[in-house]
Amino acid sequence: MRCPGQDTRYWKEDAIFEVECPHCGALVEFFKDDTSRKCPSCKRVLVNPRMDFGCALYCQYAELCLGELPKEVLRERSNLLKERIAVEVEKRLPKELFKEISSLVREMEEKAKEAGKSPGLNLLLLYFYYLSKDDLKEVAEKARLPEPVLDDIRLKLKELKEGLKPRELFEALTLKKEE
């Protein structure tokens, strides 16, 4: 299986870019899926400044793919995707519903952390479950969610029973994950 971010079919013209090394000023070429590159001049390792490690939230291969980066960097950057999604979802849901979902997201993250696991796609399903198809598509576009991940979310949403209350949805998702 190939990471959606590495699939060149989804790349745009800005997939290859250069940045100035903050240590020596030399130009370092990055591909959008590079987690890090060594500066050709000073030989220091640079973290890709444009890489969004939000994929670490849902990808079963994230540890293999991103394992060489410091955990703090991964933690900090993986929150970006989740935060972009939360901002967009908040605009589209009633205030109380969003507040309840946000609380359940935090609870899911805590449970996953205690178990030493990632909340994975289930965390995103909590956010997307109550959106219309049009809103789901719009949120995914604005959050820059890779198309294959959006496809996975759509498939998983179809598997879930309709009309669940937030707590019931949480239970269904966490029970499913434990099996």
Image (cartoon, rainbow, N blue to C red):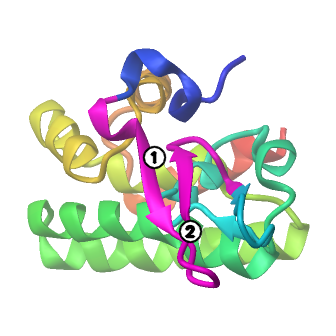
**Does the magenta run of residues contain 34?**
yes
The quarter of the displayed image where residue 59 is located: top right
Could you say which disc has been placed on residue 23 in the image? none
Q: Between residue 24 and residue 82, name the one nearer to us.
A: 24
Residue drawn at point x = 89 percent, y = 67 percent: 116
Q: Between residue 97 and residue 114, name the one nearer to us.
A: 114
Residue drawn at point x = 52 percent, y = 71 percent: 79
Residue drawn at point x = 43 percent, y = 60 percent: 81
Type of amino acid under label 1 = Leu
The residues bearing labels 2 and 1 have C-alpha atoms spaced at a distance of: 43 Å
Type of amino acid under label 2 = Ala
| Mark 2 crowd level (few <14, some 14–19, many ≥20, 10 Å Cα) | some
Instruction: Return the residue at label 1.
Output: 125
Q: Position of residue 10 (x, y in %)?
A: 38, 23
Could you say which disc has been placed on residue 26 in the image? 2
For residue 145, side relative to residue 23 (left or right)? left
Location of residue 176 with respect to 68 vertically, above or below: above
Q: Nearer the viewer, mark 2 or mark 1?
A: 2
| Residue 173 seen in the figure | no
Q: Position of residue 175 (x, y in %)?
A: 72, 47
Q: Position of residue 177 (x, y in %)?
A: 74, 44
**Does the magenta run of residues contain 77?**
no
Point out the stretch of residues depicted in magenta: 12-36
